[in-house]
Amino acid sequence: MSSIPGQEAGRFFPGLGGRGALLLAGWLLTAAVALLQAFAPAPLREAQNRLYDLMLGAREQAALSPVPVLVGVDDASLAEFGQWPWPRYRLAMLVDRLQQRGAEVVALDFLMPEADRTSPGIIRAERRRDRADPGALPGGEGSDENTARLADSLRRGKAALGYYLDFSAAPPRRVEQPPPALPTGTVLRSEASDLARPLARGELRSHPQLAAAAAAEGFTNALHDTDGTLRRVPLLLPAAGDERVSLALAALMLSTGERQLELLADGGERALAWNGRRIPLDAAGNLLVDFRSGSPAFPYLSAGGVLHDVPGQRDLAGRIVFVGAWAKGLGDLHRTPSGRLLNGVEVHATVVDNLLSGSFVTRPAWAPAVELLALVLIGAGLTWVLSRAGFRLSLLAVLAVGAGCYWGARQLLVASGIYLSPLLPMLLPVAISTVLSLLKYGLEARKVRLRTRDLLEAQDTIIIGMSALAEARDKETGHHLLRTRRYVELLARQLSRTPKYAHLQPHDIELMAKSAPLHDIGKVGIPDSILHKPGKLSPEEYGVMQQHPLIGADALTRVVVGTGHPEKHAFLDYAKQMIESHHERWDGSGYPHRLCGDAIPLPGRLMALADVYDALVSRRVYKQGMSHADVRDFIVQASGSHFDPDVVAAFLATEGEFADIAQRYADPPEPAAA
C-alpha cells in the first residue's frame, strides 16, 4: 500500500503525521500574506491601485447632478481673442455674461497673483521705468484698471477664486493679505483631530484686490498617487492654524447657503457632515472620487462663445460654473483611473456632482479587518482542500476562489460604492497552490527515488545471487568477478569520451559494469567432470565447454520471460549480450556464433578484453600470472584479430588503472599444504 503525500512529508517535518506538513506550509504562507497586507509595501499598494482602477471602470456612469457646468478657454477662444492670459477686463466680461445668464456661482480655476500688465496704467509705469523718463505721462500712472474691473464683476455675484497651497519644505511664505475668505457664516467643527493630513507651509493666491472681491476662495490642489493617477481629492486641509476648503466645496457652500461643516470620527470612520449628507473620507481626510463617463461628462461652453453672447444659449440659472483653461498646452490635466485625462475644472465639477448626488466611493474603516478575515478563511480552507485534492480539483478551487473574490469585490464597488481590495485574497490561492504543488512534487519525487533505489537494489541482489551461483561452481575465480566488473567500467567510461561512443550514458555504463559478474553464469550447466578437469580438455569436452555462453543466455532469457513483463527487466539485456558474446572475436573466429566486427555487441567486446586480461595477469594453481607489460603487449598484438581496436585503445588509455585494480584486488595466496 503506497504512502500518502502527508505521510512522506512527515519525514521532512519530524513530529508531523499525515498531511500535517502540507497544512503547516499553507498556514505559514497565509500568515505571511496577512503580514504583507498589514504593512502594505509600496509595490503592493501600487498593484492594489491598478486593480481598483480596473474595477472602478465598471462603475462609471453619466453625471447625476445637473448643477455643474464647464466653461473652457479653448483653442477656438484663443484663436479669436488672442493668447493666454487674457486681459482681466475680458475676464470681467466673461464673468458678467455668465452672471447675466443666471449662473448661481462662478468659480475661476486659475491664479492671478500679479497685477494685470495689460492695464494702461501699468503699461505707463513700466514705460517710465524702462525709459528712465522723468517726465510724467498723461493718465493714471500705475493704476490697474483691468484688475479693478474684474473685481467689480466678482462683487456683483457669488464668485469663488482658486488658490494653491504649498507643501514644500521651504520656509513658510510671508502672507501680507488676510486668510482666504470662506462663505459668510461658515462654521467648522471637528471630532477628527487625528487625520493624517499634510500641513501647508505657504500659499499662492490671486491679487489682493480680487481676493477681497470674491465671496469665497478654495484651494485647487490635487492629490496624485505615486503612479501619477488622481483617485482622491482633499476637501479640507490645514494651513496657518486654520482649515481651508477646496474650490469645489467653497462653490457648493455659496450655491446652497449651507455653511455648517463638521469633521466626524465614528468608530474609526472618517466623514464630513454637510447639508444633511455624510461624506465618507479616508484616513487622511480625502474623498475617493467617483468619476463619470463622457468627454466631457458635464455641459460644456466655450469661453469665446459666451463672450459673443449668442442668443438662445443655455440658461445657467442655479448652476455652478467652473471656468478654466481648456486649450492644448494650457489646461492642468489629470490622469484618472480609466486612463482618461481630465482638466482641472472637470475634477472640480465631478466633486460637486458626487457631493450633491450622494454617490460616493468609500473604503470603510472595517475594510482591512474584512480583508484579513477573508485571507484567513481562504488560506485555511484552501490549504485543507489542496492538501487532499488532486491537480484538477486544486486548479478548479484556485480559479473559483480567485474569480469569486474579484467578482464579489467588483460587484460591491459597482453596486454600493464600497471598496474592498481583492488582490491578496486572489493571490493567496495561487501562492498556496504553487507551494503545496511544489511540496507534493518534491515528496512524490522522493518516493520515486526511493522506489528506484529499491529497484536498483533488487537488480543488484539478482545479479549478486546469480553471480554467487556461478562462483559456487567455479571455485578458482576468486576476485575475478570484482576485477572484471571494474575493468568493464573503466573501458566503457573511456569509450564514452570518444565521439563514436558519445551516446554511452552513465546509466548504460553502470548496467554494463553490474552485468560483468554474470558473464560466466552459463558454467552452471557444464558437468563438473569438464569444469573441474585438471588437465587439458579433449575436443569433445572443449565443445561442451563452448556451450556455456548459450546456456547462460538461455537461462537469463527464461528468467526474464517467466516474469510476464520482460520490458521491466531491460537491465538484464546487457547481461545477456555479455554472457552470449564475450567469447566472440573481432575477426569472427570466436564462439558460439562466430560473429565479427561491430556485429558483436559492445558489452561482449568489453568483456572479451577484460576477461582475457584478468585470466593472463592472475595467478592460478596451474599457472603463474604474467606481468602487466607482457599482457599489454599480447593485447596490442591481438588488436583487430581477437579484440576490437577501439576497446584496445581504451585499454591503453587506462592501463595504469588496470594494473592498479589487478594489484588491489588480487586473489589471496593459496594456503600451504599440511
Image (cartoon, helix red, strand yellow):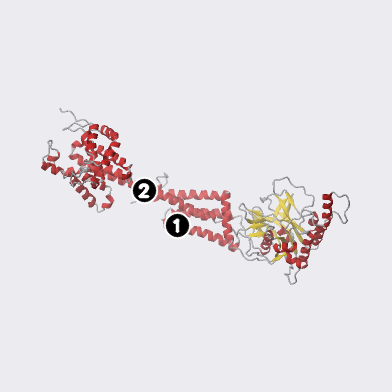
In the rendered structure, the answer to whether residue 513 lies left or right of residue 200 reads left
Q: Which residue is mark 2?
A: 447
| Position above or below: 518 against 300 | above
In this view, which residue lies farthest toward the bottom?
312
| Position above or below: 208 against 638 | below
| Front-most of residues 297 and 377 | 297
**Viewer can see residue 321:** no
Q: What label sits on residue 395 in the rendered view?
A: 1
| Front-most of residues 528 and 407 | 528
Residue 105, how many percent across, how many down? Answer: 75, 63
Question: Could you give the CA–CA distance between mark 1 and mark 2, rounded to whole angstroms?
Answer: 23 Å
User: Which of marks 2 and 1 precedes in the sequence?
Assistant: 1
Mark 1 surroundings within 10 Å by alpha-carbon count, few (fewer than 14), some (14 through 19), many (20 or more): some
Q: Report the residue at 57% width, 60% height from top.
A: 55
Tell me which amino acid carries mark 2: Lys
Residue 521, how many percent across, how many down? Answer: 20, 43
Q: Report helix, strand or loop for mark 1.
A: helix
Residue 25, how many percent across, how many down? Answer: 46, 48
| Quadrant assignment, res 417 | bottom right
| Front-most of residues 123 and 30 | 123
- Image quadrant where one finds the C terminus: top left
Residue 140, how many percent across, how many down? Answer: 87, 56
Tell me which amino acid carries mark 1: Leu
